[in-house]
């Protein structure tokens, strides 16, 4: 992305946590591991002072985000009825206002709200990184096929530990000790 003076702007990341809600999480395949990895991502993002966006699908019927996965500070929560978060004006405005170019996506369910959000965001020109071990569906086959479909459309596949170290960039960074403790917990 370039600004009006043709300088290359730095990439700005946002962690997008999709629909990890009380009534949706119960039947999710491998939910314990998913919750653990999303917690690690939130903790790392808050240490590194990165952007966090949390979505909730129809919270009146499906409940709110499970409390242990709500960031402690500096995050934007968006309620939605459409499966794709990318069609919410509030979401697009947040990305534009903060000049966010890269979306790191996790949550549930991979084959519904995540897949539709990722494909729509890719079409809008965002770089989308899907964190495969921090998302899931009720059925593993739905999760696996959705990952393949998103990759075919241009999403980048990674894991929780890999993306946290990539965001940290160096062991010399002041926050690295805290980050390392998150990884080994």
Image (tube, grey):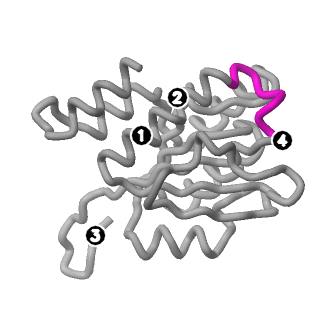
- Tag 4 residue: 23
Q: Please tell me how crowded label 2 is: few (under 14), some (14-19), or many (20+) other residues with Cα within 10 Å.
A: many
Mark found first going from the N terminus, 1 or 3: 3
- Identify the residue at horizontal 32%, vertical 53% (top origin): 49
Spatial CA distance of label 4 from label 2 is 19 Å
In the picture, which quadrant includes the C terminus? Answer: top left
- Tag 1 residue: 43
Q: What segment carries the magenta color?
A: 24-31
Q: Are marks 3 and 4 in contact (CB under 8 Å)?
A: no
Secondary structure at badge 1 equals: helix
For this rendering, which residue is in front, 177 or 151? 177
- In this rendering, the answer to whether 70 lies above or below 34 is below
Q: Please tell me how crowded label 4 is: few (under 14), some (14-19), or many (20+) other residues with Cα within 10 Å.
A: some
- Tag 3 residue: 2
For this rendering, which residue is in front, 136 or 182? 182
Q: Residue 142: image x %, image y %? A: 78, 28
Secondary structure at badge 4 equals: helix
In the picture, which quadrant includes the N terminus? Answer: bottom left
Determine which quarter of the picture holds residue 79.
bottom right
Mark found first going from the N terminus, 4 or 1: 4
- Tag 2 residue: 37
Foreground tag (2 vs 3): 2
**What kind of secondary structure does the magenta stretch mostly adopt?**
loop
């Amino acid at each position: 992305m370039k600004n009006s003076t043709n300088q290359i702007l730095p990439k700005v990341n946002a962690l997008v946590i999709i629909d990890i809600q009380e009534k949706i999480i119960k039947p999710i395949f491998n939910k314990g591991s998913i919750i653990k990895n999303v917690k690690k991502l939130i903790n790392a993002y808050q240490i590194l002072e990165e952007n966090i966006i949390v979505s909730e699908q129809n919270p009146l019927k499906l409940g709110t985000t499970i409390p242990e996965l709500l960031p402690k500070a500096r995050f934007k929560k968006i309620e939605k009825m459409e499966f794709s978060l990318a069609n919410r004006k509030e979401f697009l405005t947040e990305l534009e206002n903060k000049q966010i170019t890269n979306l790191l996506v996790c949550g549930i369910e991979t084959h519904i709200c995540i897949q539709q959000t990722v494909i729509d965001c890719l079409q809008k020109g965002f770089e989308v990184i899907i964190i495969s071990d921090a998302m899931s569906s009720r059925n593993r086959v739905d999760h696996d096929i959705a990952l393949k479909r998103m990759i075919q459309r241009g999403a980048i596949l990674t894991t929780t530990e890999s993306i946290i170290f990539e965001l940290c960039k160096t062991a010399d960074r002041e926050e690295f000790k805290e980050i390392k403790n998150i990884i080994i917990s």
